[in-house]
Image (tube, grey):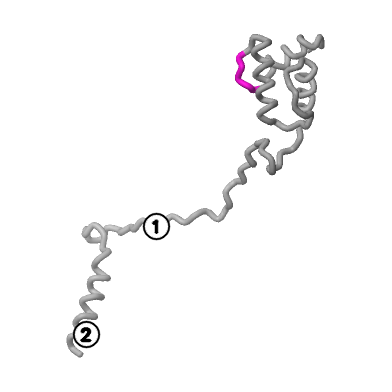
């Protein structure tokens, strides 16, 4: 019984003295707190726009008009569905090469102005 009592006091002493800090008398001791994840949920990431079958992508009117105009110029042969597909991007690149623009497949103001000029429209 005496050995257990001594062991209990030894363990208690280690626990009490183990976290004393710097050892300077009167110095406040601080222990780092574990960071807890914030209660606010992470912001929702918009779904990546892809044109793979089985994925949901909204049909966009401006892409449908672009497909129609590129079809008029015989640069696009796919469906007029308003979806940003690989076929649409390749048609944009063909158009940009024909218009002597940077063929990056991205539609911007320079590409739109060149398309309007080719179709005889006022920009």
Q: N-terminal of the two: label 2 or label 1?
A: 2
Q: Main secondary structure of the magenta part?
A: loop
Magenta span contains residue 77: no
At 77% from the left and 29% from the top, the residue drawn is: 79
- Rendered-image quadrant of the C terminus: top right
At 18% from the left and 88% from the top, the residue drawn is: 2
Q: Residues within 10 Å of mark 2 (few under 14, many from 20)?
A: few
Q: Residue 22 at x, y = what percent?
A: 23, 57
Q: Which residue is mark 1?
A: 33
Residue 16: name its quadrant.
Answer: bottom left
3D distance between C-alphas at marks 2 and 1: 33 Å
Secondary-structure class at tag 2: helix
- Left or right, 45 with respect to 18, comes to right
Secondary-structure class at tag 1: loop
Q: Which residues fall within the magenta stretch?
A: 102-106
Residue 65: name its quadrant.
Answer: top right
Residue 93: name its quadrant.
Answer: top right
Please say if 15 is above or below 101.
below
Q: Residues within 10 Å of mark 1 (few under 14, many from 20)?
A: few
From the viewer's side, name the closer residue of 19 and 110.
Answer: 110
Q: Residue 8 at x, y = what percent?
A: 24, 80
Looking at this rendering, what residue extends furthest in the front direction?
77
Q: Residue 50 at x, y = what percent?
A: 65, 36
Q: Which residue is mark 2?
A: 5
Please say if 47 is above or below 20.
above
From the viewer's side, name the closer residue of 50 and 116.
Answer: 50
From the viewer's side, name the closer residue of 120 and 80.
Answer: 80
């Amino acid at each position: 019984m005496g050995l257990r009592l001594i062991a209990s006091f030894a363990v208690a002493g280690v626990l009490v003295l183990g976290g004393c800090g710097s050892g300077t008398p009167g110095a406040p001791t601080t222990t780092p707190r574990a960071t807890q994840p914030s209660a606010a949920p992470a912001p929702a990431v918009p779904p990546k726009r892809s044109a793979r079958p089985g994925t949901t992508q909204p049909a966009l009117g401006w892409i449908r008009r672009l497909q129609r105009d590129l079809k008029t110029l015989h640069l696009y042969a796919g469906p007029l569905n308003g979806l940003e597909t690989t076929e649409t991007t390749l048609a944009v690149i063909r158009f940009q090469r024909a218009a002597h623009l940077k063929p990056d497949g991205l539609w911007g103001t320079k590409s739109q102005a060149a398309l309007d000029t080719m179709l005889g429209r006022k920009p």
